Structures are given as C-alpha cells and as structure tokens.
Image (cartoon, rainbow, N blue to C red):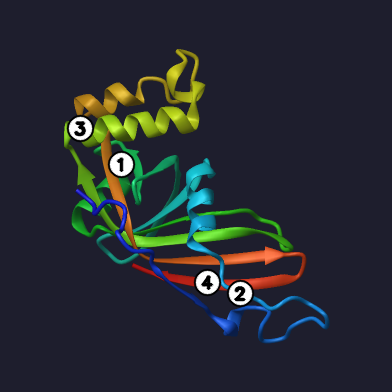
Amino acid sequence: MPTQEPVELPTTELDPRYSSAVNPRPGAADVTATEWAEAQRQLESAEIFWLSTVRPDGRLHVTPVIAAWHAGVLYFSTGPGEQKAKNLARDGHCALTTGGNSLTEGLDLVIEGRAEHVADPATLEKVIAAYEAKYGSHITSPEGTFHGIGDGFRKGDVTVFGVAPATAYGFGRDDGVYTHTRWAF
C-alpha cells in the first residue's frame, strides 16, 4: 500500500528558469513558489486526471482517469485487462497530471510516483468514501456514469492503485505571472 500522508511537508522550491522571476513585469509582486496546501486543494477538487504509463516497448500510454486524493495518496482505478493495468503491473512508475488549458490563469499539477495495487479492505472503504464524497451522484446514483464502482472495488473487478507523490510540479499562471514549483517528498 502507498505511504500515507507525510509527517512533514514536502520541500518546496521555485524554479526561476521557468517562472516570471526571469523576466518580471515592472511593478509586479515578488514571484513565490506555490504552497503545497494550494496544490492539495486542487488535487482534492480536480475531476479529471491524465495518467501516463510506459508500455513494455517503451512507448507512452496516456489516458484520462477519475481519481481521489486521500491521506496523501492519489487513488485511481482501471479494469485489470486494460493497457494501463498491464503497464503498471510491469512498471509502477507513472505520472498523473491535472489542470486547465488557459494561458493566463490556473495551476497545472504533475504528480510523479509509483502506483501500488490496493487490496486492503479497510483502505478500499476509505477510497470508496473519498470517491463518493468527491464525485457524488456520478457514483452514488443508479443513473451515474460510474455507479457501482464501489462494489467493483470491493469485489476486485476493478483494480485500484494508489500513488504517493515522490515529486510533484506545479505550473501556475496568474494574469501574466508564471511560476514553476517543485515539491520533493
């Protein structure tokens, strides 16, 4: 099972090479790194993530997934026969990304780590609760897109993975001020 919420906050570093600190606007406030608490808020609220895994021949496989952030771990699921499950069975290293597509506002996040299969019933119940709290009727209503996913988790019909971040990156944009933050765990 992935490591749970870190006891200490990750180290936070602003990379000035890719931040407005390189070419600050006149009169602009000092450019600072994004706080990890802000990144966590976005991880908790983002509805879609892009999962990147590596195929046996080295080609990338990228696909959208829904995911829930709980206790310092980002959880997602897949069918056991899907390409991402096959890739992760061979090599658990992956990245999950989320954010927006605006040039002038938002915070894009990249979480790098190792996906670990989650089968512990107590952990699965916590993950199901996190999914239900986040996605609501999409999971809890019989008309929901992902209705029944909790039962799939419990029965093992759906493979659940957890990724505790090893490194994370935040690419912030706020009205022409750009930041590149790196968090190391």
N-term mark: 3 or 2 = 2
The residue carrying mark 3 is 122
Residue at 77%, 65% (x, y): give it: 175
Q: Residue furthest right?
A: 26
Whole-percent x and y of residue 165? 35, 60
N-term mark: 3 or 1 = 1
Task: Check contact, mark 3 vs mark 2: CB within 8 A.
Answer: no
**C-alpha span from label 3 to label 1:** 25 Å
How would you rate the neighbour count of disc 3 (Cα within 10 Å): few for under 14, some for 14-19, many for 20 or more?
A: few
Vertical comparison of 22 with 1: above or below: below
**C-alpha span from label 4 to label 1:** 33 Å
The residue carrying mark 2 is 32
N-term mark: 2 or 1 = 2
**C-alpha span from label 3 to label 4:** 34 Å
- SS label for mark 4: strand
Whole-percent x and y of residue 167? 38, 67
**C-alpha span from label 2 to label 1:** 41 Å
- Give, as a three-letter code, the residue at label 3: Ala
Task: Check contact, mark 3 vs mark 4: CB within 8 A.
Answer: no
N-term mark: 4 or 1 = 1
- Which of label 4 and label 1 is nearer to you? 4
The residue carrying mark 1 is 82
Tell me the quarter of the picture where residue 161 sits: top left
Q: Which mark is residue 181?
A: 4
Task: Check contact, mark 3 vs mark 1: CB within 8 A.
Answer: no
Vertical comparison of 147 with 107: above or below: above
- Give, as a three-letter code, the residue at label 2: Thr
